[in-house]
Amino acid sequence: MKSFLFPILVLSCCLATALPAAELETIENATLVEAGLNDGDSFKVKADGKELHLRLYYVDCLETAAGTDAELERIREQQYHFGLEDPAAVVRFGKQATDYVKRVLSRPFAIHTSYAKAPGGSAIGRHYAFIETQDGRDLGHLLVEQGLARVHGESHQAPDRTPSKFVWKELRDVLDFAMLKRNGIWKETDPERLLELRKILLEEEMKWEKKCDKPIDLNTASNEQLQEIPRVGPATAAKITAGRPYESVEDLLKIPGIGPKTLAKIRPCVTVRH
């Protein structure tokens, strides 16, 4: 067990992209809306007489489906991040996170949002938000504590005005607690494989960055060239060519299966030349 703790604590680093600290609006007595697109960190709610699709700040829950090239690639990345032997565990714990949120938000809760747009496929658009449960707990903290999410994603000053850098530090402590307790997905982490799998991810990221020294044009690249991009397989490449012409790289978010996480990987490798 000792060999398990220290490598993980060292590697519990997070991706933080700071957003401007716009003022948060608080909406009380919100309720969860049943929707097929709901998962652990993104779901629909009814608040103040309107329907919103929210994406949690700071946390990233596991995937719940493996239907597209992009989803399969994200599952593989999450599998390696958590040091799992079986990729099916990713989807299983993703569904557990969805069920956990459904239980926790079965009673009215509060929303804190500045309506900052979150990329992703939704007819009504997605907005980043904090969720405060009826007993005053932050939903993101709860998910990390239960071992159902990692600390990864967009940040913002907390509702109590705690600066984002201190929110990150607190969440990392919560993450360390979950790993030490072997909560949730961490109980299936293979300590002997964790460093090896994360090293593979690091090497692949370095290789992709080198490969992306010369971005290809989304409007002229062949299917074969598109498939050389990380997270783009034959099916996604076909969708990209069918979606032409593109005005900007962000137009890729209109392609089924390409969300903000996939776009972050693709972005350095592609361009749109006018």
Image (cartoon, rainbow, N blue to C red):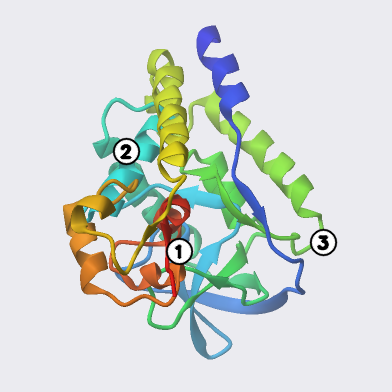
Q: State the image coordinates of residue 85 (x, y, percent, origin top left).
A: 29, 25
Residue type (three-letter) at the residue carrying disc 1? Ser
Q: Residue 42 has which mark?
A: 1
From the image, tell me which residue sits under label 2: 76
Q: Are marks 2 and 3 in contact (CB under 8 Å)?
A: no
Q: Residues within 10 Å of mark 3 (few under 14, many from 20)?
A: few
Circle 2 or circle 3, nearest the eye: 2
Q: State the image coordinates of residue 138 (x, y, percent, origin top left).
A: 64, 56
**Residue 88 falls left or right of residue 21:** left
Q: Foreground: 250 or 18?
A: 250
Q: State the image coordinates of residue 224 (x, y, percent, origin top left).
A: 20, 51
Residue located at (33% from left, 48% from top): 229
Residue type (three-letter) at the residue carrying disc 3? Arg
**Residue 89 falls left or right of residue 272:** left
From the image, tell me which residue sits under label 3: 161
Residue located at (40% from left, 40% from top): 211
**Residue 68 falls left or right of residue 49:** left
